[in-house]
Amino acid sequence: SNQRRPLIAGNWKMNGLATAATSELKELVALAKDHTAPKCDILICPPATLVREMASAAENSSVQIGGQDCHANDSGAHTGDIAAEMLKDAGANYCIVGHSERRADHGESNAVVKAKAEAAHRGGLIAIVCVGETLAEREADKTLDVISDQVRNSLPNGATASNTVIAYEPVWAIGTGKTPTPLDVATVHAHIREELAALMSDSAQVRVLYGGSVKGSNAEELMAVENVDGALVGGASLKAADFWPIVATS
Ligand code: PEP
């Protein structure tokens, strides 16, 4: 129904030590190489400590590497933080910004997320901007209002379909095994696309991912939903054997 190339992205969160991570990544690369013309883009976002090593393990393959967060500034006195340019230098092409765990654990506002996405662009990275309602917001029937607010206020200035991806991740579906119905996903994705149309000239080409408890057994149903252009996957991205079946649905 569209020309958008799906993106299947894995978010390893705070998991991964070099030896086991390298073997999982190499297994994923081998699977990707067996399928000469993957119909989707494949991305793994490991912890920052592993970006360089995973990028090297993924060299000359269709697997790309991304960061999970970056600072809003390009460099300087920000102890413990990571600049987009550093991720790029280590081999990343993408960076997740505004994941709900960062919005919750680090108090990241829409304004902060927007500034981080702009920093990702300056550093040469594609920003994956995450949005999603909490359970309380859903139960109060505020989902679409919350999504509008997040999309309008977290979308970076200068966003285009080539430098920005949106990930819709209902907070209550992350790591819980619960997923919205396909109809609920369709409603939110159509709403996001409507919001984007007012904000960007090439909005029709922007990829909008679904995230939240995607696994091999539900990926086909979720990826078939109108306006879903791929997935952001947490738990099921840690093992190549769990992640590949999700990639293979696209
Ligand atoms: C995520 O953190 O982006 C995510 C979707 O996690 P999970 O797949 O484990 O629900």
Image: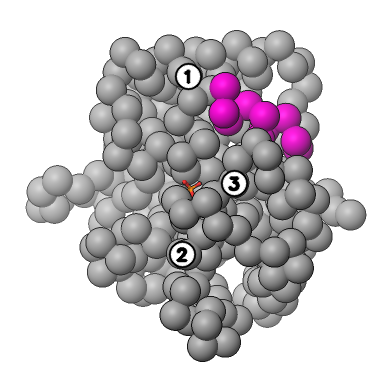
Say how the picture is coloured: one colour
* Label 3 or label 1, whichever comes before in sequence order: 1
Label 3 Cα neighbours within 10 Å, binned few <14 / some 14-19 / many ≥20: many
Q: Nearer the viewer, residue 100 or 6?
A: 100
Ligand 1 within 8 A of label 1's CB?
no
CB under 8 Å between discs 1 and 2: no
Crowding around mark 2 (Cα neighbors within 10 Å: few <14, some 14 to 19, many 20+) is many
**Number of the label disc, if any, that sits on residue 214:** 3
| Quadrant hosting residue 90 | top left
Residue drawn at x 71%, y 11% is: 34
Assess mark 3: CB under 8 A from ligand 1? yes
Decide if ligand 1 comes within 8 Å of the CB at mark 2: no
Regarding residue 78, the answer to whether it shows in the image is yes
Spot occupied by residue 80 in the image (x, y as percentages of width and height): 14, 46
Amino acid found under the numbered disc labelled 1: Leu
Q: CA distance from mark 1 to mark 2?
A: 27 Å
Tell me the magenta residue range. 241-250
| Quarter in which the C terminus is drawn | top right
Mark closer to the observer (3, 1): 3
Give the dominant element type of the magenta stretch: helix, strand or loop.
helix
First in sequence, mark 1 or 2: give its number. Answer: 1
Give the structural element (helix, strand or loop) at label 1.
Answer: helix
Residue 94 in sight: no
Q: Which residue is mark 2?
A: 171
Neighbor class of circle 1 (other Cα within 10 Å; few <14, some 14-19, many 20+) is many
Q: CA distance from mark 3 to mark 1?
A: 19 Å
Q: Left or right: 10 with respect to 21?
A: right
- Of the pair 214 and 65, the residue shown nearer to us: 214
User: Picture quarter containing residue 5?
Assistant: top right
| Residue that label 1 marks | 25
